[in-house]
Image: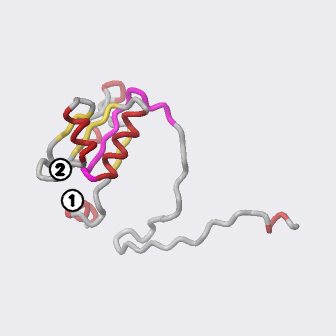
Amino acid sequence: MPLDGMLCKRPESKSSHPRMPGLITSPGLLTSFDCSGQVHLIVGSNPLAGARCAKSLGVGAKVKLIAPDSETLHYGLRQRIETGEVQWIQREFRSEDLTTLGRTEVDQVVDLVFVTIPVECAQCMRSWT
């Protein structure tokens, strides 16, 4: 069999989001980091935020959750907030959060950010317009 017949080709990917035409919908790259002591910022309070929170805590990160007090918190998030495992910042995300909520060793820049709110949310739409 010729070598070119054995090469994997990436499937064509089309974005269905009108404001993000270049959005790639294929699977991402799985990587491994030592996250112990890092600050992970999670934006949102849905079940995906709960899952991200659990994984971040599991690898030794310090989790900071940003979600307005008016939002319904996923039960797993509420438990971790009540036990003090997660710091809940009760407001909407602000861009300066990226450079003010992190570790002092890296000039207050957060190490990882997980955005779990829908793209259609009002907060997101303001930043795209």
Q: Nearer the viewer, residue 88 or 41?
A: 88
- Outermost residue on the left side: it is 70
Q: Position of residue 7 (x, y in %)?
A: 75, 63
Q: Position of residue 11 (x, y in %)?
A: 60, 69
**Magenta-drawn stretch contains 63:** no
Q: Which residue is mark 2?
A: 92
**Magenta-drawn stretch contains 38:** yes
Identified by mark 1, the residue type is Gln
Quadrant placement of the N terminus? bottom right
Q: Which residue is mark 1?
A: 123
Instruction: Please name the predominant secondary structure of the magenta segment in the image.
Output: loop
Q: CA distance from mark 1 to mark 2?
A: 8 Å
Asked which secondary structure carries label 2, the reply is loop
Q: Which residue is found at the position 26% from the left and 42% from the top?
A: 77
How many marks the image carries: the answer is 2
| Rendered image quadrant of residue 113 | top left
Q: Position of residue 59 (x, y in %)?
A: 43, 32
**Which stretch is magenta?**
33-46
- Outermost residue on the right side: it is 1
Q: Which residue is found at the position 21% from the left and 36% from the top?
A: 81
Quadrant placement of the C terminus? bottom left
Q: Which residue is found at the position 53% from the left and 59% from the top?
A: 27
The reply to whether callout 1 and callout 2 are in contact (CB within 8 Å) is: yes
Left-right relation of 70 to 33: left
Left-right relation of 21 to 125: right
Mark 1 or mark 2, earlier in chain: 2
